[in-house]
Structures are given as structure tokens and as C-alpha cells.
Amino acid sequence: MLIVALTGGIASGKSVVARILEELGCYIHHADEAAHQLMEPEKPAWKEIVSHFGKKILNEDRTINRSRLGKIIFTDEKERRFLNKLIHPLVLEKKKEAIQKIEEKGRHIIFISEAALTIEAGYSDLFDKVIVVYCKKEVQIERIMKRDHISRAEAIKKLKSQMDPGKKLEYADYIINTSGPFKSTVEETERVYRSLIQDYEMKHAGLGPTRRDNRD
């Protein structure tokens, strides 16, 4: 099975690309969903988060209010590092478990990990290939404003809290630009998918190498 990372900045279009790849037959593992599960009430991550940030971040049903937590971590780099250091290793373990299960079932040849912070966490070399999704800065700002119902200034603050999109592109084996119409995104994603099929065939035939083969 070809193990692929799908990453990109906030509101870059990762979810759209993931849906297209899923329709094409790839298995999609959503890191955000795994993180949500790890942060459910009384789970180990939940306990550490509440202990660190306090009960002010909880809803009445004791679930974590992600909006309140988000406001904290998007404005305080120290708190953001704390949360990432806690969650990233736990999500990685869940990802490894998912890879093993999917390989055992043998129904998919391409495993896609959709995760915004793959590169920032230092995990890019754990994958055979890395896809970076990006769009023009102005498009990204408008998407953040629309999605989160926030001002332009708040959207820019969120954008600045993440790695510069240009630096992410340096890690990419494949790049998908979602700045244009949906049709263009579909065409670019299909092009990348065809390349991934070839990558799988080469890996299966032992003709690599892949990123994971090149790890120290």
C-alpha cells in the first residue's frame, strides 16, 4: 500500500481534495477526526487539556469547546505548542493502527492521511509521498472569513499562526492549487491520483525509492 500525506494550510482546500481522492478509491484517514475522538470527555488527552487550560474551555456537557480552545492556541504560540506536543503523537499512533488494519483488509492500494500539520510535526518522512494543497493568499483569507464568520484581521491572524505556505511547498512531491474553479481542482487532483497509482505500482514492484526508504 502507498502511504501518502495530504497537507496544506488552513482553508487551503484539503477537505475538497480528500473527498475527490476518496471518490477515486483512496482510503482517507482524517487526523482532525482522530484528534476529536482523543479529546472526548474522560479520555487521557481530554484530562490533560482540561488540567492545563482549565474548565473554562468546556461546554455544559463537559465536551471541549473547540472555538474557545482555538482562540487561545491561535493567539498564544506557547499554548499551541503544548497542545500540538500532546495531540500529534497520539494521532500518529491512531494513524499507524489504521494503516495496519487497512493493509490487512487489502481493499485499498493508496492510504491518504489528511492532516494540516504533518510537516510542522516533523512527520513528512513517515510517508511515501507528500501532497501539498495550497491557494492564493487572498483566496485563503476570504475562505477563512466565510467559514469561521470572522473579520479579515482575525483571518490574517489565524493564517500567520501557521507555517508559511511557500515553505510547505518545499516538502511536496505533488502540488494541488485550489485557487481556481472546482473543475480545475478536480482535474489537478485526478492528475495527481494517476501519478500515485504509478508510484504504487513502482513500490509494489520494488522499484522505489520512497521518502520512507530514505529515512535515516
Image: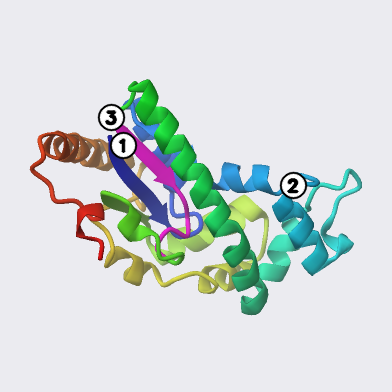
Circles 2 and 1: CB distance less than 8 Å?
Answer: no
Asked if the residue at tag 3 contacts the one at tag 2, i.e. Cβ–Cβ closer than 8 Å, the answer is no
- Alpha carbon separation for disc pair 2 and 1: 38 Å
* Tag shown at residue 43: 2
Q: Which residue is mark 1?
A: 186
- Residue occupying the point 26% across, 49% down: 128
Foreground pick, 49 / 74: 49
Q: Amino acid at mark 3?
A: Ile
**Among the two numbered marks 2 and 3 on one chain, the one whose residue lies closer to the N terminus:** 2
| Whether residue 50 is situated above or below residue 43 in the rendered picture | below
Q: Which residue is label 3 attached to?
A: 109
- Residue 84: percent from left, percent from top: 58, 64
Q: Coloured how?
A: rainbow
At label 1, the amino acid type is Val
- Secondary structure beneath dot 3 equals loop
Q: Categorize mark 3 by other alpha carbons within 10 Å: few (<14), some (14-19), many (20+).
A: some
Of residue 66 and residue 176, the one placed in the foreground of this image is: 66
